[in-house]
Amino acid sequence: MGSDSETEKSAQKEREKKKLLALAPIAKPLAGKKLCKRTLKLVRRAAEHKCLKRGVKEVVKSIRRGNKGLCVIAGNISPIDVITHVPILCEEANIPYIYVPSKEDLANAGATKRPTCCVLVLTKPAKGELGQEEQEKLKGEYDQVSSDISELANSMF
């Protein structure tokens, strides 16, 4: 019985190594394990409340229209040219952004089956309104992740 859990753990470590090997060289700032988990949880909650833009085209369109939020970019995109302009747009619009190791994990958190390059977590839903309590919960989580990302970015540069 003990060997089964050990083989499972070694398989998990092997998958983690493969994810890190597939990372693009420009994937900085890259979220650590804890921040990655918290960020994906925020993406999941935003997807439930329809406060999420998925894919490069939608994200770029939202940023150019002046929508504010948090941009989460997958680090294992190939070819990398697909998303190289997104961090620049985010910096110009003063939007915090973070890379996560896997596009598959990002898609699962964003409630889609298809792997996703990037998502933009909005503070308010695109259509309709949220309840006051849900809005405050989402905003609190958003602020916490956003401040962690700012700390990480400041320590890098």
Image: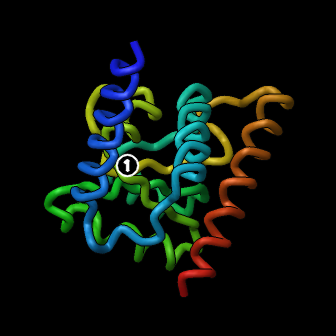
Q: Is residue 114 above or below residue 56?
A: above
Q: Residue 41 occupies which quadrant of the picture?
A: top right
Q: Residue 83 occupies which quadrant of the picture?
A: bottom left
Q: In this orientation, does residue 108 appear?
A: yes
Image spot of residue 138 (x, y percent): 73, 39
Name the residue nearer the viewer: 17 or 136.
17
Please report the residue visible at 36 percent of the width from the left and 68 percent of the height from the top: 27
On the rendered image, what quadrant is the C terminus found in?
bottom right
Q: How many marks overall?
A: 1
Name the residue nearer the viewer: 27 or 71.
27
Residue matched to label 1: 58
Q: Is residue 23 above or below residue 4?
A: below
- Regarding mark 1 in the picture, which secondary structure is present there? helix
Image spot of residue 56 (x, y percent): 32, 53
Name the residue nearer the viewer: 54 or 144.
144
Q: How is the image coloured?
A: rainbow
Please report the residue visible at 42 percent of the width from the left and 54 percent of the height from the top: 100
Q: Residue furthest front?
A: 2
Label 1 Cα neighbours within 10 Å, binned few <14 / some 14-19 / many ≥20 = some
Q: In this orientation, does residue 57 appear?
A: no
Name the residue nearer the viewer: 40 or 66.
40
Q: Residue furthest top?
A: 1
Image spot of residue 50 (x, y percent): 56, 31
Q: Residue furthest left?
A: 79
Image spot of residue 6 (x, y percent): 37, 28
Left or right of 119? Residue 96 is right
Q: Check disc 1 and give the amino acid type.
A: Glu
Left or right of 37? Residue 89 is left
On the rendered image, what quadrant is the N terminus found in?
top left
Q: Is residue 33 above or below residue 25?
A: above
Please report the residue visible at 43 percent of the width from the left and 48 percent of the height from the top: 119
Please report the residue visible at 67 percent of the width from the left and 54 percent of the height from the top: 145
